[in-house]
Image (tube, rainbow, N blue to C red):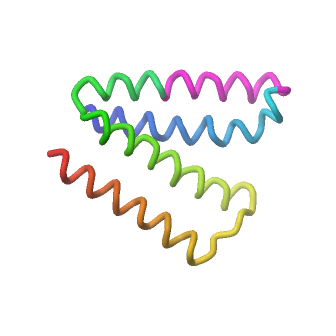
Amino acid sequence: MNWIILVLAGLLEVVWAVGLKYTQGFSRPLPTAITVAGMVASVWLLAVAMKSLPLGTAYAVWVGIGTIGAFVAGVALFGEPAGILRIASVALIVAGLVGLKLSAG
């Protein structure tokens, strides 16, 4: 169950990372409220997951999900480049996350 909570925390990290782009420096109230709510919920769920998951594993997976999600969102929503080197780099992050999950038991 804590792995599911951790994945949700990571997905909410993507929400607030994308939300930051829409806040325009926290000058737009609705995107700012969504972003701050996403931040709070993401960190809270991370803390809940860390009750039983190792710190290094939980934090790395949380950040990894956020990094991969932000990359995908940047490409899909903002037209950022998705060159082969960038995709290969993200694939390495995915491999690292799978390795952490498999080694966590």
Q: Position of residue 74 (x, y in %)?
A: 67, 55
Q: Position of residue 4 (x, y in %)?
A: 32, 37
Q: 6 left or right of 86?
A: left
Can residue 90 be found in the magenta stretch?
no
Helix, strand or loop: magenta stretch: helix
Q: 66 left or right of 6?
A: right
* In-front residue for pair 92/34: 92
Q: Position of residue 25 (x, y in %)?
A: 81, 32
Which residue is located at x 74 percent, y 26 percent?
A: 32
Q: Where, quadrant-wise, is the N terminus in this rendering?
A: top left
Which residue is located at x 56 percent, y 42 percent?
A: 14
Rendering quarter of residue 28: top right
Which residue is located at x 22 percent, y 27 percent?
A: 52
Q: 100 left or right of 30?
A: left
The stretch of residues the image draws in magenta is 27-42
Which residue is located at x 57 percent, y 27 percent?
A: 39
Q: Position of residue 100 (x, y in %)?
A: 27, 51
* In-front residue for pair 33/84: 84
Rendering quarter of residue 75: bottom right
